[in-house]
Structure formats: C-alpha cells, structure tokens
Image (spheres, grey):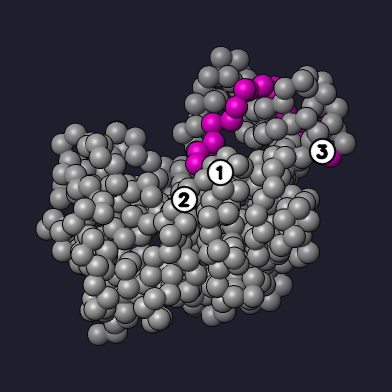
Amino acid sequence: MNTLPLLPDSVTATAMAYRNSRPVSRAEFLHDVLALAARMPITNHVINLCKDRYWFAVTLFAAISRGILSILPNSTAPECIAALRTEVPDLVCIGDQPYYPFVHMPYMQVSDVGLKSFSATSVMPYIPFDQRIICVYTSGSTGRPQPHIKTFGRMRQAALAEAQRMWAATGGPCAVVGTVPFQHMYGLESTVFLPIFGGGQLSTRLPFFPVDVASALAEMPVPRLLVTTPFHLRKLMDADIIIPPVSAILSATAPLSQELASEAENKLCAPLMEIYGSTETGQLAMRQPAVQLEWEAYIGITLNQCHGITTATGGHLECPQVLNDIVELISPSSFRLLGRNSDMINIVGKRSSLAFLNHVITSLPGVHDGVFCLHGWNSGNDVSRLAVFVVAPGLSATDIHTALLQHLDPTFLPRPIIFLEAMPRNENGKITADAMSALIAAHLLQRS
C-alpha cells in the first residue's frame, strides 16, 4: 500500500502556523492533531465547523489520522444540516464554539483544554494515498450543491503543484492570509493545504473588511501571500488604508478583470496570480491576468479537446475530467477561457456570456455591484430577456442604459434594471442559484 506522512518533513521547530502572532511549530501542530484524534468519538463522518483556521486544520488532520471522512457542506443552514444528518446518521459535529450548534447531533468542542501537555516526540502517522479525507460541495452558484470526494494523496499533489507555481512568483514559501472561507475548495486548497504541504505558514484569521485584512497581514511574518477574491479585492482597493507589504496576491472564484488586476499590482507592488479550477477538478491552471490572457496548466495536467468538449487529465486528477467551460486550446498545457457552457446566452441569434455582461456592468463608473440574469418575464413572449440587478446609488436607469450602449449591442441592454441596496453574495463573493431565484421571484415575477 502506498502511504505518505501526514505532514511533510521539516525541522520540528519550524513555524507551521501563527496564532495571535505566536508561531506554532510543526511538532506542536502534530501534537495537537494527535491529542485531538485520541479524543474523537468513534464514527466514520464528522462535520468540521471550526471558525478558527488553526483549529479547523487541527480537526481536519486529526480526522485524517483516524481515517474519518470530513464533510464540508456549502451551507450550515439548519435545514441543510438536517438533510445531511438524514443521509449520514453517524455524523458528529466538531467545532470551536462553546455552544451546541445543532439539535439532535453529537457535538465535540475543540479547545486548548486537554491538549497542553506538549511533547516533541509524537510519532508521525502514515496515510494511504487513496484514503478518502473530505467530501466538499459545489458552491450552488449554478444549481443544487453537489458532493465530491477527495483523497489524501491527490489533495497533497494539488497543493504541491500550487506551491511550485506560487513560490516561483513570490521567491519562496510564504505566510498565507486568506479572506476566503476554508470550508470550500479554493480556501481549503490555498489557505490550509498550501501552507501546510507547501512549507508556508497558516494564519488563523478570516478577515473580511479591508482594515481586518491589513491587521491580519501585519500579524504574519514576511514574505506574505494574500489569498482573496475579486469581490474582496475591489473593497480592498477602494479602502483608503495602508496595506502591509505582500509578495503576491492570489485570486479565484470569479473572473478577474485585467483592470482590477493591474490596479492591485500597482497599489500592492506585488504580482497578482489567478487560479482556474472548480470544486470538481480542484485547481488546474494559473495566470497573471495583468500581463497575460492565457492560462498555463499545472505541471502534469494535459488538456484535450474533441467536438468542443475539453477534458483535463493527469496530475492530481484521478480520472479524466470534463471542463464546464468553453476554452480555446493554444497547446495541451495552455488555453484561453471564453466562458462557461452554462453561461452562454443567445438572444435573437446573437451570442454573449453572462460573465462578460457582468464584467461590463460592474466596470461602469458609479456601479458598486451588478449581475445580469436571463428571464422571460413576459409570459406571453417566448423570447427570454435580460434583466440586471445593480447597486448604484446616485444613478438612474437611463444613466446605466446610456453607459452600457458604449460597450454592448442594443440586443443585450437589460430591461428592466432593478436597483438594490446590496447584492446577496455569499462569503466567497458568489451569488448562489437559490439567491438569484429569490431575486427573480421578488422583483421580476410580479411583472409577468
């Protein structure tokens, strides 16, 4: 059986994480992992709801060492957890909150209590390459969230591939600060597995507001990597605050405009890298959008195209994976992204993509946020029409139509324009399919 050490080899005194500015060594982290593993109840499934990234990582690796599958749902709404418990009767909840989060589910609180008798002589567990370690769910932005099982060896491979690309941009391993939730694939890969397997340092913080991002960065040693999203990055660029030096910025979850990438590089004096991937595939490719249109696949990943369908193979992928995007292949390892298959729209014979339209609306002066949707709100008309939801205080519908005409064919002008005080984005900066349906029901169905 092919096995791998739970943690990579390193000097035991090397910092693996920082908690309240205090370094935590690899040996101390391993001790906490094994101490928690010894206290875990007998079960095959846990749901990891720790809000502190350090305790999340300790709980995750403790479960791995015990052969327990960690389930990471995309939502912790009571109805979602109740449905999950029906599917997985032996599910145990582990968290760092002192209160009991869900009724009728066993709960174990993680804390320093019982883990303080530190010993540097803990024996490193070895984990089967193909051991199933996490069940992670899609975001729900394109429909009902779907579960995907990931194995230890392949998650480690993906983290090392990301580290190879990122550390080449930064000049070496970094302390990693992330604004993205670590229960979802991007945050899990880039703020937990990347620093742990890639030799960097993990931050416990999950900052949201720009001032909190600056504070979290200041707590960490240099060099630093900021892992974020276009939504959070835009807020950071608009804030009039001093940002501690970073060696690079990493973005994913939504298309990043070349303008925002260039602005961030100029303001933070660091390269901005963007990840291409999905929950299904994990990360597959990277680019520096301020200076390149093409995506470069990770070493070992090969792309093939047949009848317009693109398939990725090799690397950390267990089997060939069909991409849900329309891409232009430049070579077996490089491509241009044209849009998602589910994103392309056709109105009276003219084609565009919702991603492009969203980029246009959010780039207009005075528009703080915006999203297009395709909706046939006139029930007597079989032709679907575009509508747009915008956060644009001070602008009128006429202002927006006039500005859009500078960029779009009149066919793609939205009718109507719905003004909102805020967009219902989740913590990843995405609008889920359910949230979009609620917007349509509240603002458009009444026009039918």
Task: Pinpoint residue 126: horizontal percent, then vertical percent.
Answer: 26, 79
What's the amino acid at mark 1?
Asp
The dot on residue 408 is 3
Front position among marks 3 and 2 = 2
Relative vertical location of residue 132 with respect to residue 268 in this rendering, above or below? below
**Residue 63 versus residue 446: which sits nearer the camera?**
63
Mark 3 crowd level (few <14, some 14–19, many ≥20, 10 Å Cα): some
| Circle number at residue 212 | 1
Residue visible at 65% across and 60% down?
246
Mark 1, other Cα within 10 Å: few <14 / some 14–19 / many ≥20: some
Q: Is residue 320 visible?
A: no
User: Whole-Å distance between the Cαs marked 1 and 2?
Assistant: 9 Å
Q: Secondary structure at mark 3?
A: loop
Q: Which residues are magenta?
A: 407-431
Total numbered labels:
3
View extreme (left): residue: 42
Residue in front for this viewpoint, 88 or 47: 47
Query: For the residues marked 3 and 2, what is the alpha-carbon distance in whole angstroms?
Result: 41 Å
Residue at image point 34% right, 39% down: 76
For the residues labelled 3 and 1, the Cα–Cα distance comes to 38 Å
State whether the magenta stretch is mostly helix, strand or loop.
loop
Q: Is the C-beta separation of discs 1 and 2 under 8 Å?
A: yes
Q: Give whichever of discs 3 and 1 has the lower sequence position.
A: 1
- Which residue lies under the disc numbered 2? 205
